[in-house]
Amino acid sequence: MADLRVNVAGVEFQNPLIAASGTFGFGREYNEFYPLSALGGISCKGITIKERPGNPPPRVTEAPGGMLNAVGLQNPGVDHFIEHDLPWLSKQGTKIIANVAGNAPEDYCATVEKLNDTCVDMIELNISCPNVHNGGMAFGVTPEGAAEVTRAVKAVTKKPVIMKLSPNVTDIAAIARSCEAAGADGISLINTVLSMRIDLKTKKPVVANVMGGLSGPAVFPLALRMVWQVCEAVSIPVVGMGGVSSAEDVIEMMLAGAAAVEVGAANLVDPCACQKIVRDLPRAMEQYGINDLKEIIGGARHG
């Protein structure tokens, strides 16, 4: 029987499929289609210290091979998450990853501290947010910025911390190394790719925010390349994501070095996408002579 279990930073997942933040809410809507216990885990919608309304519409549009979004981290805030969502999530039989965002190190720290004594299994830090102390430049675009927020959060949290990296950088490996040196327990990547569309009728950008993040199958080769580079650069676990939509994509990501895989935009095309990928993994493993997923992690890099 195929062994789908994986371990990321000391957290045991029954399978490598994690629903990616921003595409799965807090799981309630998807639970109407299938039990969330089918998943290895859920990376919840990004939460901040206070409620955020998000960006003005239109903030989502289609693109060749994917979609653009500029939702702007709309969320009810960490207190609402703890009071209203976690009690329900704790009963669903899957690992819970809290995706945390902020505009300053103190924002991240205040949010993760509130999560210390909860049932959250792991923290995923979105460091693609604008750093208000640095003129709006995202934390994750420089090694120094990434290390700063990593150190600050690790000093106050009781949970394993994985840093979610932006692909909109010149040297993804250097940023991953800085996170590892600052104490990160793992890395996840990629976040969305900065992109835009223009409406030929109005001759204006389609998205009100002008630019948005591209996700979907179009970014898979880019994501795979960056996962490979980061796995070459660090010794901590890496969670791969970006355009994953099939069992074969999961295996490819793991061969590049990913210990687990997040599925994002595919959930918006088919709400049962994650469930179908999990069901199809044993078939794909048998086809390619794989008995234990843990044994193939980084296999393409190690010959």
Image: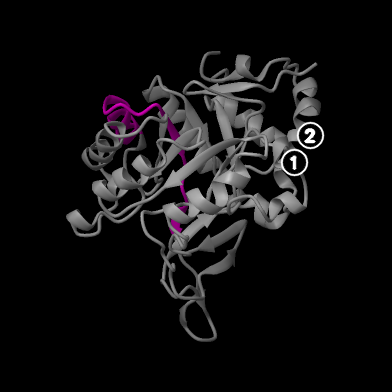
The image quadrant where one finds the C terminus is top right
Q: Residue at x 58, y 45 (%)?
A: 87
Q: Position of residue 61 (x, y in %)?
A: 57, 68
Q: Element under label 2?
A: helix
Q: Is the image coloured rainbow, by chain, by secondary structure, or in one colour?
A: one colour
Q: Residue at x 65, y 21 (%)?
A: 5
Query: In this figure, which residue is indicated by the disc labeled 1?
Result: 275
Q: Position of residue 113 (x, y in %)?
A: 34, 40
Left of 216 or right of it: where is 287?
right
What amino acid is at disc 1? Gln
Q: Which residues are magenta?
A: 173-194
The image quadrant where one finds the N terminus is top right
Does the CB distance between marks 1 and 2 fall below 8 Å?
yes
Viewer-side residue, 60 vs 32: 32
Mark carried by residue 279: 2
Left of 9 or right of it: where is 253?
right
Tag 1: Cα neighbours inside 10 Å, few (<14), some, or many (≥20)?
A: some
Q: Position of residue 125 (x, y in %)?
A: 39, 42
* Whole-number angstrom distance, CA of label 1 to CA of label 2: 6 Å
